[in-house]
Amino acid sequence: MHKLKEIWRPKAKNLIVPSTELLCVNVHKIQDFQACKRYYFWRWILNLVSRRPNLNFWFGELSHLAHELIAEGKTAKQIKLTLDKRSRKILKGFVVDSSMVAEIDLQLEICKTLMSCYLEMFGGKLQEFKAIGTEVSFGLELGLSGLVLYGTWDAHGILKGKLTLKEIKTASRLTNEYFQRLRFDKQINTYALGVKSEMKKLPSKCQYLVIRKPTIKVKQKETVSQYLIRLENDIWEVRPEYYYITDNFSFGKHRVAATQNDVEQEAFDMMTKVDSLDDKDLLDPLSWARNDRQCFTYGTCLYFPLCANCHKWKLYLGMYQMRDIRYELEVEELNENETLDTSKRGKLS
Ligand code: SF4
């Protein structure tokens, strides 16, 4: 599975190019298909994302980048500069209105503070991990469906003589079950399969780091600099155990095989559904059932306006744009004969 050098976007800015061929799946596609069929349709068939940036994804991408740079031995100063650059690059693709600017600036400073404190706190220990690869993309053919499972893991290398996978996540909330659930987690278990295909053996462990976003907020009349000093104090003095939580998860042959089976079955169901529909039905939201249990699970679902007004959903397309296409096989899935124009606000096209 090859990552594209440049992200693929339609030639005309306001066009949406849907995916009507199913050739490849990733863990997010599968999870969305499981959670809500209509969500899967909006996100992976129509390829819609909000025109405004999702700050959680943006924060997550910056954290990943910082971790990659840490693994490469970069200094805190170099990391901060690269984060600034990447942030600008990501946000360039979205509509950032003036109401978001202050929040983005604050979150960027929080991200940099969390990373520099992490580097300072664990710098010595981090040297124990000898990275073999960072941000490694993989593609594995699934047996049941013939689809290609693709993804990109954060890093793999040697830790205390053992082949180890490293994953980093950012989270606001951590439930008691968070780490328990990793045993079934499709992402890290399929990444283990990716590492196996690269290194010819399963990694022994996954060092899974969760960086928690601060719960303390900027107070009234407090400047960002004063807040960041208070945040550093919270990290170092008040709650040093709160912000960086590591779980050393052990892989096992049976555990990985059980997850692989889940992925195989879900991908097969997905393929069966897609193959049963012609392009006209495939591109009709009514072919994809809604799951009302999911609409408010993580705040209001991004696609709520479309689902709530499904009889005139095209009127709401102006709120969305084409998602980034990052892999070669994803480009092959696109159907340029079925494009949708998102510039015709208020008109059914
Ligand atoms: S609004 Fe609800 S039904 Fe519609 S895509 Fe989102 S989760 Fe599914």
Image (cartoon, rainbow, N blue to C red):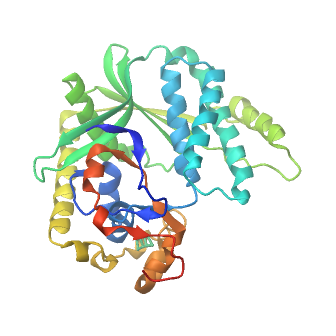
Q: Report x, y in % for residue 179.
A: 41, 43
Choose between 250 and 268: the one closer to the eye. Answer: 268
Pick the quarter of the image with the C terminus: bottom left
Q: Quadrant of ligand 1?
A: bottom left
Is residue 343 visible from the viewing direction of this image?
Answer: yes
Q: Quadrant of residue 42?
A: bottom left
Q: Residue at x 20, y 66 (%)?
A: 274
Q: Report x, y in % for residue 120.
A: 64, 21
In the image, is 7 to the left or to the right of 211?
left
Q: Report x, y in % for residue 103.
A: 71, 51
In this view, the residue farthest toward the front is 11
Q: Residue at x 26, y 55 (%)?
A: 333
Q: Is residue 24 above or below residue 62?
A: below
In the image, is 90 to the left or to the right of 249?
right
Choose between 225 and 150: the one closer to the eye. Answer: 150
Q: Quadrant of residue 90?
A: top right
In this view, the residue farthest toward the bottom is 311
Q: Residue at x 36, y 20 (%)?
A: 157
Q: Report x, y in % for residue 315.
A: 49, 80
In the image, is 248 to the left or to the right of 278?
right
The number of numbered discs placed on residues in the rendered structure image is: 0
